[in-house]
Amino acid sequence: MSRSLDTKYVGDLYEGFGIVVAETRLLDPRFELLPLSRIFSWGEKDEAGAKQLAFALLYDYTQSEEEARRHYNSFFQRYVRSLPLKWSCCGRDVSAELGAIDAQGVLALANAA
């Protein structure tokens, strides 16, 4: 079961480290499920940290390790790598990106057939 479309995520830098808040709590990086980086980052600066953020955001929103694993790399490519230094998004944004990623996959399968 997914979180609400209104779930708010906010990212900012604090003393050079990426901090992400989901509603009123720090976003759990889920290192135990996918240990790509010990920090969050976004944009082009640190690919491993940005992929960790992509996975954590997807896991938090979808509440599904399987969904997060399946889509984190595409979500990183399409969304996380283009985030500005200070950013915010909501569950609706995450859901829209997941829909676009799924549609892109369906289109690729159709073109391959």
Image (cartoon, helix red, strand yellow):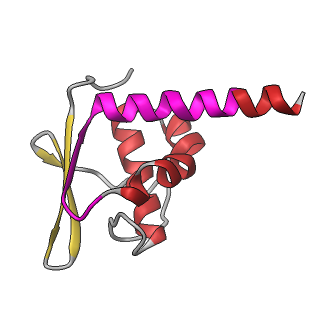
Q: Could you say where residue 48 lies in the image, as x and y percent from the top left?
A: 47, 69
Q: Is residue 63 visible?
A: no
- Using residue 98 as the reference point, say whether residue 95 is left or right of it: left
Quadrant of the image containing the C terminus: top right
Q: Which residues are magenta?
A: 84-106
- Say above or below: 64 vs 44: above
- Using residue 40 as the reference point, say whether residue 12 is left or right of it: left
Q: Could you say where residue 79 lies in the image, as x and y percent from the top left?
A: 42, 49
What secondary structure prevails in the magenta region?
Answer: helix
Q: Could you say where residue 39 lies in the image, as x and y percent from the top left?
A: 33, 70
Please report the residue visible at 49 percent of the width from the left and 46 percent of the height from the top.
75
Q: Is residue 71 visible?
A: yes
- Using residue 48 as the reference point, say whether residue 23 is left or right of it: left
The verdict on residue 99 being magenta is yes
Residue, far right: 113
Please report the residue visible at 27 percent of the width from the left and 60 percent of the height from the top.
84
Q: Residue 15, located in which quarter of the rendered image?
A: bottom left
- Say above or below: 39 vs 105: below
Please report the residue visible at 14 percent of the width from the left and 46 percent of the height from the top.
25
Q: Residue 37, located in which quarter of the rendered image?
A: bottom left
Please report the residue visible at 59 percent of the width from the left and 41 percent of the height from the top.
70
